[in-house]
Image (cartoon, rainbow, N blue to C red):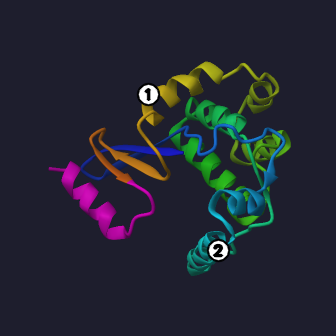
Amino acid sequence: MVWNSSFSCCYLQVKWHPFFLNPNAPKEGILKSELYKNKFGSTQYEHIISRMREVFRGLGFEYDTAGMTGNTLDSHRLISFAANQGYEKQNALVEELFQNYFIQGKFIGDKQVLLDAAQKVGIEGAAELINDPNKGLKEVNEELEKYSSRISGVPYFVFNGSFQLSGGQPPEAFLHAFQAVSK
């Protein structure tokens, strides 16, 4: 996911754009632990998972490593579609999908998980979109080309179209970004 914001004075608008960490991920999914062990090796995997659990616990959550990961095209189509109903709905959907994936161990490549999340946050027309693999595809591909072509990792933040932050950042980095673009 690519996060893009624009604001003036005291107003912040968050927009989400697609990004594929693993464009060749299988549609049917693979265990997160298996994918990460294969990608990073067992030792680095253990360090990464330990750090993620620490961060999540610090926020009052338990990081779930038992779930599946895989192709996220349908979730990106749904998130892009949600923006047409307002960025507040898009943000609520992304928050719900993050909870599903990172905390509840749900596979966000599963159509029912996507439909349940969309229903929970009030996205209208989600079933029609999800059940037609061509709906929203053009929009996602256009956004991938526009926003993601020069990005190698997430999270990636763009402030007022000019200032960028990549990767996990401390709060001070965001404060600096807000100050830099408000001048």
**Residue 38 horizontal/vertical position (percent):** 71, 58
Q: Is residue 163 above or below residue 168?
A: above
Name the outermost residue toward the left: 183
Q: Looking at the image, how many numbered discs can be counted on the residues?
A: 2
Callout 1 secondary element: helix
Is 156 on the left-hand or right-hand side of 117?
left
Callout 2 secondary element: helix
**Residue 18 horizontal/vertical position (percent):** 55, 37
Dot 1 corresponds to which residue? Answer: 146
Which amino acid type is marked by label 1? Answer: Lys
Is 100 on the left-hand or right-hand side of 57?
right
Dot placed on the residue nearer the N-terminal end, 2 or 1: 2
Dot 2 corresponds to which residue? Answer: 43
- Residue at 36%, 69% in the rendered image: 171
Q: Nearer the viewer, mark 2 or mark 1?
A: 2
Residue 80 vs residue 140, the one in the foreground: 140
Q: Is residue 116 above or below residue 132?
A: below
Q: Which mark is residue 90?
A: none
Residue 92 vs residue 53, the one in the foreground: 53
> CB of mark 2 within 8 Å of CB of mark 1?
no
Magenta part of the protein: which range?
Answer: 166-183
- Look at the image and say whether residue 174 sits in the magenta stretch: yes
Q: Main secondary structure of the magenta part?
A: helix
Is 11 on the left-hand or right-hand side of 94?
left
Residue 183 vs residue 32, the one in the foreground: 32
Could you tell me how far apart the alpha carbons at marks 2 and 1 are, in whole angstroms?
36 Å
Category of crowding for the residue at label 1, using alpha-carbon neighbours closer than 10 angstroms: few (below 14), some (14–19), many (at least 20): few
- Residue at 27%, 41% in the rendered image: 162
Q: Quadrant of residue 124?
A: top right
Which amino acid type is marked by label 2? Answer: Thr
Q: Quadrant of the N terminus?
A: top right
